[in-house]
Image (tube, coloured by chain):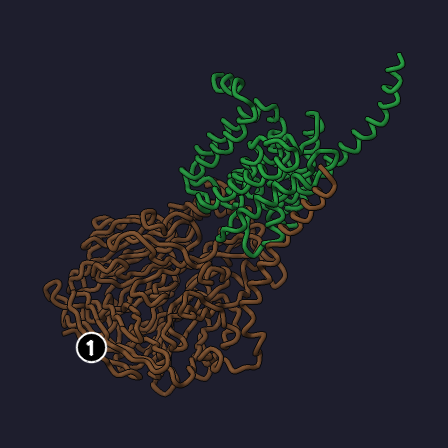
Chain colours: A green, B brown
Amino acid sequence: MLPASLFQRVDKRYLAPVLVTMVLVVGQLSFGFLESWWRTAFAILTSIAVELLLGRMITGKWPHLASAYISGISIGMLLRSPEFWPYPLCAAISIVSKYVLRVDGRHLWNPSNFGIVAMLVLASDTVAGLSVQWGNNLLPMVVVWTFGAIIIHTLGRFHITLTYVASFLFFAGIRHLVTGHPFLAEAAPLTGPMYQLYIFFMITDPKTTVHGKRNQCLVTVCVAAMEAALRLMQFVHAPYYALFIVGPIANLIEIAHTRVASRQTVPAVAPAPSH
Amino acid sequence: MRPYSRLLLGLLLVALLATPLLIRRHRAAIVYAPSAAGAAADAKARYGFAFTESAQAAGIDFTHEGPTLDPQLAHIMPQVASMGAGLAIVDVDADGHADFYVTNSKEGSKNRLYRNKGDGTFEDIAGRVGLAALNEPGSGVSMGSVWGDYDNDGFEDVIVYKWGRPELFHNDGGKAFTRVTERAGLPAWANINAAVWLDYDRDGKLDLFLGGYFAEQVNLWHLASTKMMPESFEYANNGGRKFLFHNLGGGRFEEVSEKVGLTSRRWALAAVAADLRDTGYPDLFIANDYGVSELFINEGGKFREVGKETGVGYAPKSGMNASVGDVLNQGTFAVYVSNISEEGILIQGNNLWVPTGGTPQLPTYENMARAMGVDLGGWSFGAQFGDLNNDGFLDLYLVNGYVSASKTDNYWYDYSKIAGGHEVVISDAKNWPPMGTRSLAGYQAKKVWLSDGAGHFTDVAPMVGVTDRHDGRSVALGDFSNRGVLDAIVANQRGPLLFYRNDVAPGRDWIAFDLTGRCASDSEPAMTCSNRSAIGARATVHFNGQQQVQEVQGGSGFCAQNQRRLHFGLGPHAKIDKVTIRWPSGKISEIAAPATGRVHAIKEP
């Protein structure tokens, strides 16, 4: 397939930023779904500035900005507020959290997930999540899904997205049985742009997901299950909270497991030099 | 990373996380400082006015009742059947005392026309004059009314718009009303929630705009399909059509919406006509639910939609009110649109569109609601500007609250679930989760925002006596006792009508104008005289080195109409340099240094 081969040749670090930019452009040009261009730009610029500053200060090197760009643009799209300040603040919280909340060199939370949850909890009088849908036709969603699938597949993470979608629909069926509400109502959120961002960028974030396809799929099912539980408790922002809760737990378990494994391997390796 | 670097970064993260809390605390301190400092202080002394809810004492005992629609909507009935408490202030018998008309919405219920007896009490004369029984089964139910003298005979006629068959009545000398719906050519069925009288072509005869909410094919009592809900929460284009009835004279109207460019299928909930560009022609601002607002500028009798060019048509929200006011005493109108805000769930914020740039022909607007402190109301409906304490600056009265039912359970989660869904899901009522007895944005406080004249408003509602938690729909302002103060009446969905009598502190000057156009019939040549109701006439009062402009309106807010009289507060020791009145015909009247403290009855020369 031409796009796939094209994407194969491109530096993979640029693929996700390209996709998220495409989501932004399609969403804005189709329906004007941004709170404003300025707010989004403010979030992106803050995110990049903080990343540059902290990356340089802490590692002594200029960091690659793809991750910060994705965080900024995601915040610019997912956050809804009539005020300006939540956008740079959320971006700053997201990037700083990445440098502070680390264990064994790994950060535990997806940065924008952490920032958005922080804002939803701490600034609930000013901030809400993206709640609109893709207008009145499926075309923008088809475009995003097509390119999203190609790009995320190229990055080797499409199984996470598919697992999540399947899990969400499964749990939507469970919720339908539990609440008696129409299945389509339970499945409805999946058709919104918030979920496109969520399933393509947040839950697939390489830096904050566990290793190995099977483990990744397992964690994804856990996120969807947690989300379903939160939805049954009527949490409006259930997907953010679910990832916020499950993501770091999964990472900590993996980190602990790695520590144990490395301790067990040290004695076996240590004698080697004597040979 | 060095340990101290980690510590410093940790502190930075804590500081960042604390920032929203500090901002909230700072705001709360600003907002509540007045009440905290003087909870027992007299509101009149502190704010210059106080309201006393006086419906019962005034002989008003109206309670709105909602309709029962098609059983296929039973599971979401409270939110669908959630409008209809509309009101309009009118001097129905031209006796100089403001009366008012309020609509009911239960099948078989009666609308009321409260005639002001002039002694502080009212009597319902709707049945006597033939304006009560407008909700008969099969004819739909009332949503509101607007009044205007369409035949220039000196008495205000009325259109009662409905989900159903709209009805036009001719006022026969203030004693009785004659139904003239068929002769006027009104549609047999439409689901109207917005109406204004305006003279869009300045021919001296009032024309009528009607804005549809549900599509006109939908009969909410006999649904052909449950796919009648909005196709999108913020981009819906499957609402009711717009009507513009051009007044031909002789009680006949021609529907010209398409001919003049008023084509839209958005879900109109409110409209206001005002000359926003100082061209002499009334422009039309429509606040739409489930989408962007629309601004139709009037180019000599043809309309052009310029929402995007002017900045008001970008961010889609849930528009439910349209009212205009010269909030900065600059001689220009800002437009207030109410929306939905619920902490932690949906923060649309209300819009206050203030003209800040562009050209006189095409101004651009900036939403200053947050900066001026009038953005967060709740699930907001009607709002009106008026100088409530006669200090020379327009204040803002806003009512809020959607469905008040259970005090412990709410529908927000399920609402947000469906609101995010695709057209296929959201547009079909059968996909909407059942509401049961749950509330949705219920029991909300109202806002009485007092202007400081410098661009900031402070909510003083509880301090001045506005403490009700009903589901407010329409609010209208008028001087019911000819005392030079603005009283407020509020119609609540499935709740009592509230009559807030205003008591303004002494020593604050005011002036008011009862304007009358010169057209004495509906067959006079265009541009030679103005409609008798003077709808579209604008008065600019130059006082104390500033100016304030107001315009006579044929409907504003949400399903409401203020008193046609223009009331200007002036503050203490006011000195009026002059008052300029520009009539819809284009004529100008100038009054030098008019006396304050009285109502001036002015006829078009």
Please, is residue A114 above or below residue B31 in the view?
A: above
B496 relative to A269 in the view: left or right: left
Identify the residue at image location x=59%, y=46%.
A181
Along the line of sight, which residue is nearer the eye, B253 or A248? Answer: A248
Instruction: Please state the horizontal and vertical placement of residue A81, each as a whole percent of the image.
Output: 51, 51
Instruction: Please state the horizontal and vertical placement of residue A119, each as a whole percent of the image.
Output: 59, 50
Instruction: Please state the horizontal and vertical placement of residue B189, each as a whole percent of the image.
Output: 32, 55
Please, is residue B429 above or below residue B284 in the view?
A: above
Q: Of the residues shown, which amino acid type is indicated by label 1?
A: Ile
Quarter of the rendering containing residue B499 = bottom left
Along the line of sight, which residue is nearer the eye, A35 or A94? Answer: A94
Please give the chain letter of the residue carrying mark 1.
B
Identify the residue at image location x=45%, y=69%.
B449
B62 relative to A272 in the view: left or right: left
Along the line of sight, which residue is nearer the eye, B550 or B518? Answer: B550
Identify the residue at image location x=34%, y=47%.
B308
Instruction: Please state the horizontal and vertical placement of residue B588, each as a whole percent of the image.
Output: 17, 69
Mark 1 lies on residue: B591
Helix, strand or loop status at disc 1: strand
Residue projecting furthest to the left: B525
Along the line of sight, which residue is nearer the eye, A11 or B141? Answer: A11
Residue projecting furthest to the top: A275
Identify the residue at image location x=83%, y=30%.
A260
Can residue B462 be spotted in the picture?
A: yes
